[in-house]
Image (cartoon, grey):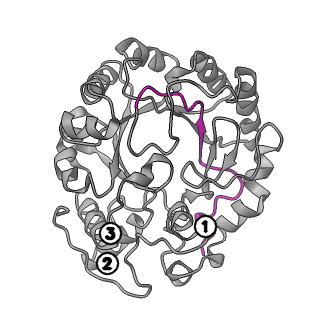
């Protein structure tokens, strides 16, 4: 495997779950968020120290994403952002579509130097989106937040859940995302953790069809389309390039990045895991060195060693740029090094992928 697919010195992105407090009740919530904060979540002082510890990774510093729950539920959010920016970090924030996400809050995020925010659109209509989010009016507030972000030139990413319940709506969601003016559309493929276990994942064949459709879209309206927990999108893009006698168009964005390899997650109480969807802790920031945990813990080292993978992933010619979802492998079998059951690829084959919208 090429070394360019190994991120063993530092993660490219650190996701910090600043709180699990949130005023939504999303059916797919990984964090099983509640209205009130956990009294054991990291304090302001501990959060500031965490950012200082992350700075020891050195240049180039990881990108810090403040997520939740809803980060706006933390009264010290802007103190944390200011400290991160003073340390030299690029910072993004993932707020929830609640009444806290006002135009004033968005303007303040922009003024604080936040690089981007993420918004969630899980349906092409209010009924479908609010049905998943569990709170009426969430869809309307999300559209208003996008308008407010555009008004202050704050780039935003739209996240959309991919599961059996949303699959047929994705072609209708795309023009909504383009019309909002999003810079990026990230398709979040369901991992059955937290409340997400009540929803149904799509089948491997449907996933293959969907990824082929996405790979054929190019960049509609300048939109960059990426996937979360479906790294085999990179394999589909490469295969599409081969089938058409041309290089893949943008499909290798983030090649090699996956749970524990370029990605690290810090939970609300300080637990360090390879991602928010792979709940295997290598220690708590209150007790262990986070830099050493990423670089040297057996779990992170094993996740970066694709030669240790089993099943189809062990023999796959795309294991470098792809590597499969380690979180889904763990959720399916209890083995984070196992094969990703959502991938339909059989190593050594180069099928011509369909290009029609998902059915």
State which tag comes first along the sequence, 3 or 1: 3
Label 3 to label 2: alpha-carbon separation: 25 Å
Label 1 sits on residue: 336
- Front-most of residues 233 and 166: 166
Query: From what the image shows, is residue 319 above or below residue 157?
Result: below
Q: Tag 1, which secondary structure?
A: loop
Q: Does the magenta stretch include residue 285?
A: no
Q: Tag 2, which secondary structure?
A: helix
Magenta region: which residues? 1-24
2 vs 1, front mark: 1
Quarter that holds the N terminus: bottom right
Q: Which residue lies furthest to the front in this view?
A: 198
State which tag comes first along the sequence, 3 or 2: 3
Crowd around label 3: few <14 · some 14–19 · many ≥20 (10 Å)? some
Determine the residue positioned at 27% across, 27% down: 136
Determine the residue positioned at 64% across, 40% down: 267
Residue 337 falls in image quadrant: bottom right
Label 2 to label 1: alpha-carbon separation: 30 Å
Crowd around label 1: few <14 · some 14–19 · many ≥20 (10 Å)? many
> Is the residue under label 2 in contact with that under label 3 (CB below 8 Å)?
no
Label 2 sits on residue: 242
Label 3 to label 1: alpha-carbon separation: 20 Å
Q: Can residue 113 be seen in this view?
A: no
> Is the residue under label 1 in contact with that under label 3 (CB below 8 Å)?
no
> Is the residue under label 1 in contact with that under label 2 (CB below 8 Å)?
no
- Side of 186 relative to 84 (left or right): left
Q: Where is residue 338 in the image (x, y as percent from the top left)?
A: 57, 74
Label 3 sits on residue: 203
Q: Position of residue 110 (x, y in %)?
A: 45, 20
């Amino acid at each position: 495997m090429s070394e360019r697919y190994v991120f063993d010195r530092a993660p490219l992105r650190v996701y910090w779950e600043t709180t699990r407090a949130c005023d939504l009740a999303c059916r797919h919530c990984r964090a099983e968020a509640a209205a009130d904060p956990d009294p054991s979540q990291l304090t302001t002082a501990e959060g500031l120290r965490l950012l200082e510890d992350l700075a020891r990774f050195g240049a180039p510093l990881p990108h810090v994403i403040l997520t939740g729950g809803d980060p706006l539920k933390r009264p010290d959010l802007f103190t944390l952002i200011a400290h991160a920016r003073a340390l030299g970090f690029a910072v993004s924030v993932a707020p929830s579509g609640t009444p806290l996400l006002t135009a004033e809050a968005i303007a303040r995020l922009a003024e604080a130097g936040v690089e981007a925010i993420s918004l969630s659109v899980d349906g092409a209509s209010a009924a479908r989106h609010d049905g998943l989010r569990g709170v009426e009016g969430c869809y309307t507030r999300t559209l208003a937040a996008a308008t407010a972000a555009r008004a202050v030139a704050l780039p935003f990413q739209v996240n959309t859940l991919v599961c059996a319940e949303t699959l047929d709506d994705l072609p209708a969601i795309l023009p909504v995302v383009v019309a909002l003016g999003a810079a990026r559309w990230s398709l979040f493929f369901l991992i059955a953790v937290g409340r997400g276990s009540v929803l149904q994942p799509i089948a491997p064949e449907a996933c293959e069809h969907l990824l082929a459709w996405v790979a054929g879209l190019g960049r509609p309206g300048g939109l960059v389309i990426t996937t979360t927990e479906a790294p085999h999108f990179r394999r589909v893009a490469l295969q599409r390039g081969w089938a058409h006698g041309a290089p893949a168009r943008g499909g290798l964005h983030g090649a090699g990045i996956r749970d524990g390899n370029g990605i690290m997650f810090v939970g609300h109480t300080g637990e360090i895991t390879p991602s928010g969807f792979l709940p295997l802790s290598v220690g708590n920031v209150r007790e262990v060195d986070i830099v050493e945990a990423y670089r040297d813990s057996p779990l992170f080292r094993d996740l970066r060693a694709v030669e240790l993978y089993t099943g189809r992933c062990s023999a796959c010619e795309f294991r470098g740029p792809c590597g499969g979802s380690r979180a889904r492998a763990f959720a399916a079998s209890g083995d984070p090094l196992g094969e990703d059951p959502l991938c339909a690829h059989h190593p050594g084959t180069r099928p011509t992928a369909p290009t029609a919208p998902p059915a």
